[in-house]
Image (cartoon, rainbow, N blue to C red):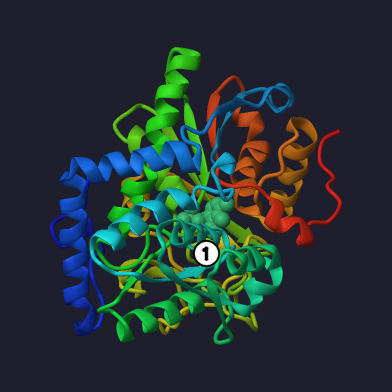
Amino acid sequence: MIGPDAGGHFGAYGGRYVPETLMEPLRELEAAYAAALRDESFRRELSTLLRDYVGRPTPLTFAERMSERLGCRVYLKREDLCHTGAHKINNALGQGLLALRMGKRRIVAETGAGQHGVATATVCALLGLECVVYMGTEDMARQAPNVRRMRLLGGDVRGVDSGSRTLKDAINEAMRDWVTNVRTTHYLLGSVLGAHPYPTMVRDFQSVIGVEARAQMQERTGGLPDLLVACVGGGSNAMGLFHAFLDDPVGMVGVEAGGESAQAGRHAARFLPARPPERGAHAPSSFSGVGVLHGTCTYLLQDAAGNVLPTHSIAAGLDYPAVGPEHALLHDQGRVRYTSVSDAEALDAFGVLALSEGLIPALESAHAVAWVVREAAELRGKVILVNLSGRGDKDLGILPDPGGLR
Ligand SMILES: Cc1ncc(COP(=O)(O)O)c(C=O)c1O
């Protein structure tokens, strides 16, 4: 696997910016993870569960009607068909097995859209672990079906009422719990975020997506796609897809949440070019610069004084002010192009997929599809692989009647 340096740095990004009390537990986790990777029985147990429990390999679906309408050839990697309905379980299972090896029988996790929380509660039930999930109360309201699922699975869902009451605040609480209970507890972080080794470890557990998709594309088309497209919240489904293709002549696009506008607080596009405040504007424009959040150094939505900005996205899983540090490096290297689509574009794309393919995507995944729909004129004739990171049952309560293509 292509890795960071020994300190967990991806170029200038990543690293381990945590209180002293967490340094030793993180070193212990790094060592346990390295040992597990070398252990044939760990790898065998994980791949057996991924096959027999999660349902891997997930299929690759050619989106025929959508391709016809758009003038390009769109393939969908069907992570929505994983058990629990999203890619999140690939990582939750890997870390759950690791926690068992480390003798930690209590798990804390954060969740935004609830998919990581559901995956974690599922894995805890499967492996007999205690499960506590922190979730912002704003997210609990908009992703209520997942709150119920977590509770039915035995998860102790704790609402977080501070800050913007979304993912960032849930991570704060989960980290606080972990610091307090670190001897008995594993923090099962859900994206390629946080202090080293999390960004690398989560990417590795998700890289099964790209490994499968690469082989499936070759088998199906005799070659590789021209372009990979994935939505980017923290960035785990995107890294999971991109990683196996990094040495290939394949373009890559990461789609962030453009929300309602480029105004500060109304989006979660960390790579949106920084703009100076407009003259006479009441609210400051968004500013994305390098900073530290939740233990890692990366691109971060912040104001000129370095205060973390609030974010907005219709997709709870994309509603976070920082992005995984490996994405920050891939951005600077120009290897991956990062762009954003708006809430409205994501909703339209949801309608396109529902009406022309019979698929109900998660609103997060609809962002990736939306970019293809918007850029279709530029993509004519191209072979495009889109990561359909999850299914949309959780979003039924916030979706208007779908429009889109008929
Ligand atoms: C279906 C789905 N896709 C994407 C994401 C975004 O996370 P990440 O960028 O880590 O893949 C989430 C987060 O909850 C999700 O539920």
Would you say residue 304 is visible in this rendering?
no
Image quadrant for the C terminus?
top right
Tell me which corner region of the image, top left, top right, bottom left or bottom right, holds residue 306: bottom left
Q: Nearer the viewer, residue 311 or 183?
A: 183
Ligand 1 within 8 A of label 1's CB? no
The quarter of the picture where residue 188 lies is bottom left
Is disc 1 surrounded by few (<14), some (14 to 19) or many (20+) residues within 10 Å? many
> Residue at the spot x=70%, y=73% of the render?
141
Give the camera-side residue of 261 and 253. Answer: 253
The residue that appears at 63% across and 79% down in the rendered structure is 137
Relative to 274, is 181 on the left or the right?
Answer: left
- In this view, the residue farthest toward the left is 6
Most extreme residue toward the top is 222
- Give x and y (percent) for residue 264: 58, 73
Q: Nearer the viewer, residue 278 or 34?
A: 34
Q: Which quadrant of the figure contains the N terminus?
A: top left
Q: Amino acid at mark 1?
A: Gly
From what the image shows, is residue 399 above or below residue 105? above
Measured as percent of width and height from the top left, residue 156 is found at: 53, 75
Judging from the image, what secondary structure is the residue with disc 1 in? helix
Left or right side of 91 for 79: right
Give the x, y percent position of residue 393: 70, 52
Q: Which residue is mark 1?
A: 117
- Is 220 drawn above or below residue 101 in the view shown? above
Q: Position of residue 167 (x, y in %)?
A: 52, 71
Write the residue at 39% across / 69% down: 289
Quadrant housing residue 299:
bottom left
Can the viewer see residue 194 in this picture?
yes
Residue at 24% over, 83% down? 19
